[in-house]
Amino acid sequence: MPGLRLTPPGASRRIERVRNPLSPPPARLPRPNRRARGRLHGLALLRLSAPSALAPLSATAVTALRVAAGALGTNRLLAQCKLSGALPRVSERLGDLVRTNSEAIHAVRTAADSAVRPWNDVAISASIHPTPDTHIELVTFGQRADAVSMLLMPLTGNATGVRAVVALLGALLTRPIRMLRALWPVGWSSRAFFVLAMQTADNAIRLRARRGWFGGVTLWSEADDARRMPNRIPIAREITEWLAKRTGGTAQAGALEVLFGIPTTAHLLGGAVIGRDTSTGVIDAQQRVFGYENLLVCDGAAVPANPGVNPALTITAMAERAMTFIPAAHQSEQ
Ligand SMILES: Cc1cc2nc3c(=O)[nH]c(=O)nc-3n(C[C@H](O)[C@H](O)[C@H](O)COP(=O)(O)OP(=O)(O)OC[C@H]3O[C@@H](n4cnc5c(N)ncnc54)[C@H](O)[C@@H]3O)c2cc1C
């Protein structure tokens, strides 16, 4: 993507691929291949990368570019372009309002003799709203996902750090068979289900970028003090423990949550969100990057809030809506 010069609106609506003086000019466009993962609007599939002597750059031109590298990928790409000077006008809000769907991942490993057969169920089988802003889904995995259990530990109360380790050791001493069975991965996915909690709450983290060696960037997360993310969702724990009791099973939670109070999410969103202007977001309501109106963000990075549900359809609907603002080829030529 660097190697791409995006001219500001007004000057020209073209995006030109700029040749890196350190690399020889290729004779023709790179052909789409299996390794290529990005999508260059109506032109070709390309791996988007940072400007560096290693990046093969061609001298072609496109009229618009749609970035859809996922929340992490898009934050990384735009940060890379901003820090390298390829896209200096990208808003300073890049990396702000990164949403985790205010999520907590818990699980119940049912007892060996339980009549409950989670593997026989559809993947997402039930859904409740225990509070107005909390949505809980039961998720099952079939019989061949035992490795998922490696992400989990038995839930032994609200302590974190050393106290969590002490609580775990205490549980191992007092209920050794139950605890060892909960930690044993083989057969886990036949017996267990996730209790996936998601909230519409207005909390967030930030992604910060630092230039790395060889032209890349390193992203790291930090707390957003104005919108602090909870390190646990008490109602979700309560429901998980209730379900464990009802099924004679063991309550589990993400290992990072149990040990360090860091919740896990499968739904990272935001960071290049829709805003009124560059002081509130990175893209406008048509998902065009402020300052580069022919550059669009069409993935989870654009989502400005915690939807409190699995977000794939929201992301798709937003991307489809953004596409409706792009004139058809014959219209734009007129
Ligand atoms: C285990 C799991 C289960 C989930 N289940 C559900 C579910 O049941 N329902 C639901 O709604 N959501 C679910 N989600 C969430 C959903 O998958 C994501 O929210 C959604 O796919 C995000 O869409 P996206 O377009 O933002 O990014 P992605 O779907 O991640 O697409 C981004 C693509 O860009 C590529 N890419 C990254 N960097 C570059 C680069 N530099 N150049 C070129 N290409 C690049 C990536 O390889 C990837 O293919 C789940 C997520 C996980 C992890």
Image: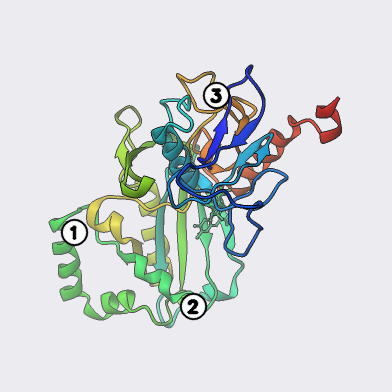
Q: Is residue 58 visible?
A: yes
Q: Residues within 10 Å of mark 3 (few under 14, many from 20)?
A: many
Describe residue 80's horizontal placement relative to residue 26 as left or right. Answer: left
Residue highlighted by disc 1:
164
Residue located 83% across and 28% down the image: 333
Q: Is residue 268 visible?
A: no
Describe residue 53's horizontal placement relative to residue 17 as left or right. Answer: left
Separation of residues labelled 3 and 1 (CA atoms) = 46 Å
Residue 290's disc is 3
Separation of residues labelled 1 and 2 (CA atoms) = 27 Å
Residue 147's disc is none
Residue 190's disc is 2
Dot 3 or dot 1: first in sequence order is: 1
Q: Quadrant of residue 276?
A: top right
User: In the depicted view, which residue is nearer to us: 296 or 307?
Assistant: 296
Determine contact: label 3, label 2, CB under 8 Å: no
